[in-house]
Image: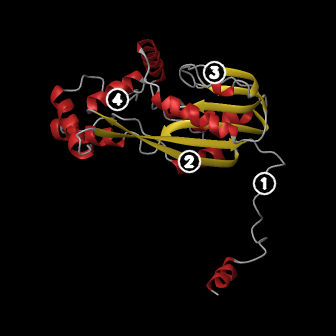
Amino acid sequence: MATPPATAPILFDRALLGARLARAQAAGAATFLLERATEDMADRLQAVSRSFSSAADVWTPGDGLAEVLHGRVASVGAIGFAEAEALGLPPETLDLAVSALAFQFVNDLPGVLAQIRRALKPDGLLLAAMLGGDTLTELRQSFAAAEAECEGGVSPRVAPFADLRDIGALLQRAGFALPVTDVDRVVVRYASAFALMADLRRMGATNVLRERRHTPTRRATMLRMAQIYGERFADPDGRIRATFDIVWLSGWAPHESQPKPLRPGSAKASLEAAVKQVKR
């Protein structure tokens, strides 16, 4: 009997995410991370020596990347946030797909990458930025320590973030050629943990884990969390540090013009011989 295909675990409540993103926009979103990613996106696209005729911006918050793509791409479509993760992109209709700070809240990232891969024409490019790595590690550790001390247990507070190796493997799994990942670490300083959490609300980036705690956090736990944060992650002037790792990922739809890896055993010289030559 055939084994049914595995389905991606549902980690995030995307309906709640949509509501919080909308609330953040209405209240005046905190956009400094998005602005940084947008500027970097422009620089990275500038370094690509080819033109693009059709592009899609996948779920980038706010006004998206329209200004970055203006004048560079003849036709740009924006896919707005949706609770469902089906993109509805026809096969081989795009030569560029971009996204900024949206993929970290996707339940089925391999599935989304596979959809984008199918939508790209041969030699089409995916360029995206997402939060990953050690993002908010200080907040995660402080909450865990405070809950363990004050309540005798730990609940999910900060979303799990993928690292570079995981994301690179997902690009390969989705069928992208020449996959590349790198990280831009941003350390932001705040007056307190509560100031950080206010900014997270203004990003629409507060806890949307399905397994999150649904009852209010005790005041004593919150105060102890802020105290631990200050004890462990403050600079000499008393301001705390918050880490945001912006992980960049890129990959190309395969095309015959792209460089190919050498066949095993086809090298003209051995590594051993090269080392011996250097030693001389």
The reply to whether callout 3 and callout 1 are in contact (CB within 8 Å) is no
- Label 2: few (<14), some or many (≥20) within 10 Å? some
Q: Secondary structure at mark 4?
A: loop
Q: Amino acid at mark 1?
A: Pro
Asked if residue 21 can be seen in this view, the reply is yes
Residue, x 59% and y 19% (percent of image)?
A: 80
Quarter of the image that includes the C terminus: bottom right
Q: Amino acid at mark 3?
A: Ile
Q: Which residue is mark 3?
A: 79
Q: Secondary structure at mark 1?
A: loop
Q: Please identify, in this view, whether the residue under mark 2 or under mark 3 is nearer the observer.
A: 2
Residue matched to label 1:
259
Q: Is residue 106 visible?
A: no
* Mark before the other along the chain sequence, 2 or 4: 2
Q: Is residue 280 left or right of residue 202?
A: right
Q: Position of residue 161 (x, y in %)?
A: 45, 40
Q: On the image, numbered disc 2 is attached to which residue?
A: 182
Residue drawn at 52 percent across, 33 percent down: 36
Q: Which mark is residue 212?
A: 4
